[in-house]
Image (tube, grey):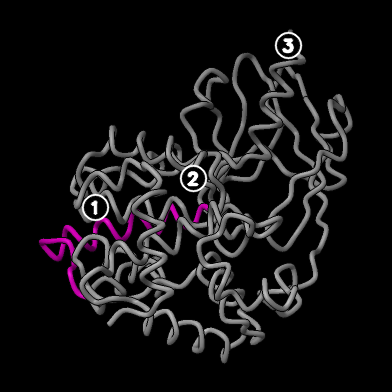
Amino acid sequence: MAHPFTTILLDWFRENRRPLPWRETRDPYAIWLSEVILQQTRIAQGTAYWQRFIERWPTVELLAAATEDEVLREWQGLGYYSRARNLHVAARQIVELGHFPDTMDEIRRLKGVGDYTAAAIASIAFDLPEAVVDGNVYRVLARHFGIETPINSTEGKKTFKALAQELLPPSEASAFNQAMMDFGAVQCVPQSPRCANCPLIESCAAFREGRVEELPVKLKKLQVKTRHLTYVYIRCNGYTAIHRRGAGDIWQGLWEPPCVQNDDLLKNAKLLRSNVKHVLTHRILLADFYLLECAERPPLPDDFIWIPESDISQYGVPRLVELLLETVASYQK
């Protein structure tokens, strides 16, 4: 017999289910794609990207046949670019396997797929009884059952996973997992949750004890560091210079203009904007944007290439470089 929490949650879901495009299919490729895109991305933004990917690469075989540059370019603006590279590698894994993996062990072997994503794909695409646990699930369970164990501790992860699995009805795994996601996203939200019309209010420990704003508990985050960058956009007879960022730093595989410190390039360059702020997960970037217009190409490291300025939109660049390009375009006008 289902837990009362589960019964009420599923009833709520039937009335409040969000109409999302990837919920209209059982295609594991489409479901996997949505889960990867929605990691660290709001649904409002991620939906447009999902639709573009599906339109350009409607099958995993077509995505696997794309180049990494094409995938990164389509991903541009979503951030966390390792997701795009992992997506591309995993697509090739799937093609090599000959079918979309349909067991938890096989799904977990896909590049970039962790426990949450594997459980989501397994339950939604294949009806496997695997509970998902993400930020929404942590919050709903912590509040309803009054759990004070930090959600980002080893003990907390085990506790919440076990509870979610216990509450999951094996015959309705897909509905339960999606209900948990939706309930945390639209009802039991982080700030000012809709407690007044919550169907679980009578059994909610946090509401009963006046601790809604205190739960869930989370250990302190890593200290955010500030990093300064100086970009120089070079304009030389209709061409500009860019290079691909290497491994071991942010934005691996994306393209950027020269990023310099006390360089000769700055001597004749014009400052367009200073201290442009761009926030990442564990660091804040402050960037200065310069424009260097010259008749002869200045010497640059060997990994730089010269491209027509009109072609730069064909290269995947991080959001901060997009801001630089927008600034340069505004200066032209």
Q: Secondary structure at mark 2?
A: helix
Residue at mark 1 to residue at mark 3: CA–CA distance? 43 Å
Q: Is 201 left or right of 132, judged from the image as shown?
A: right
Q: Which residue is mark 1?
A: 29
Kindly identify the amino acid type of the residue bearing the numbered disc 3. Answer: Gln
At 36% from the left and 41% from the top, the residue drawn is 19
Instruction: State which quarter of the image contains the N terminus.
Output: bottom left
Magenta span dominant secondary structure: helix
Tell me the crowding category of disc 2: few under 14, some 14 to 19, or many 20 or more residues within 10 angstroms, Cα based: some
Please tell me whether residue 90 belongs to the stretch shown in magenta: yes
Instruction: Pinpoint residue 121: horizontal percent, then vertical percent.
Output: 29, 63
Q: Is 297 left or right of 203, judged from the image as shown?
A: right
CB-based contact (under 8 Å), mark 2 and mark 1: no
Tell me the crowding category of disc 3: few under 14, some 14 to 19, or many 20 or more residues within 10 angstroms, Cα based: few
Q: Which of 251 and 135 lies nearest the eye of the viewer?
A: 135
Q: Quadrant of residue 300?
A: top right
Q: Which residue is mark 3?
A: 332
